[in-house]
Image (cartoon, rainbow, N blue to C red):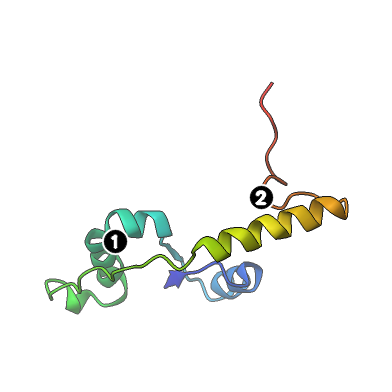
């Protein structure tokens, strides 16, 4: 079973209840080693497909532009003006 990060508590409860060990697929690993990761998943969920041609990695294109950057800057400025924490740095702790 492929594990995603959608509603993890409910998924974990379901998997434990049914004795299923989830397969973890990390996005960054998928991007770095697409074919090897896909083969590992196929081996787990459909071993009969092993040896079949693996589809090539999907192509990607940038979805943001200058407008997106301006909107992020505006959001951060509005949050600062309202005294709200910076969501980008909220979890960041400076090293001492």
Residue 60 seen anywhere in this rendered image of the structure? yes
Please say whether residue 84 is visible from this viewpoint: no
Say which of marks 1 and 2 sits in front.
Answer: 2
Residue with the mark numbered 1 = 37
* Residue 81 falls left or right of residue 13: right
Q: Is residue 84 left or right of residue 2?
A: right
Give residue 11's position: percent from left, percent from top: 58, 73
Question: Residue at label 2?
Answer: 88
Q: Residues within 10 Å of mark 1 (few under 14, many from 20)?
A: some
Mark 1 or mark 2: which comes first in sequence? Answer: 1
Q: Nearer the viewer, residue 90 or 40?
A: 90
- Residue depicted at 64% across the width and 73% down the height: 10
Residue at 80 percent of width and 49 percent of height: 85
Quarter the C terminus occupies: top right
Quarter of the image where one finds residue 23: bottom left
Residue at x 88%, y 55% (from the top left corner):
82
Q: Residues within 10 Å of mark 2 (few under 14, many from 20)?
A: few
- Residue at 71 percent across and 59 percent down: it is 74
User: On the rendered image, what quadrant is the N terminus found in?
Assistant: bottom left
Q: Position of residue 48 (x, y in %)?
A: 18, 78
């Amino acid at each position: 079973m492929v594990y995603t990060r959608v509603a993890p508590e409910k998924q974990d409860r379901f998997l434990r209840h049914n004795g299923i060990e989830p397969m973890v697929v990390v996005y960054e690993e998928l991007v770095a080693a697409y074919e090897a990761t896909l083969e590992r998943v196929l081996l787990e969920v459909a071993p009969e497909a092993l040896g079949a041609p693996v589809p090539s990695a999907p192509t990607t294109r940038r979805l943001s532009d200058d407008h997106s950057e301006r909107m992020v800057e505006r959001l951060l400025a509005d949050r600062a003006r309202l005294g709200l924490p910076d969501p980008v740095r909220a979890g960041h702790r400076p090293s001492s």
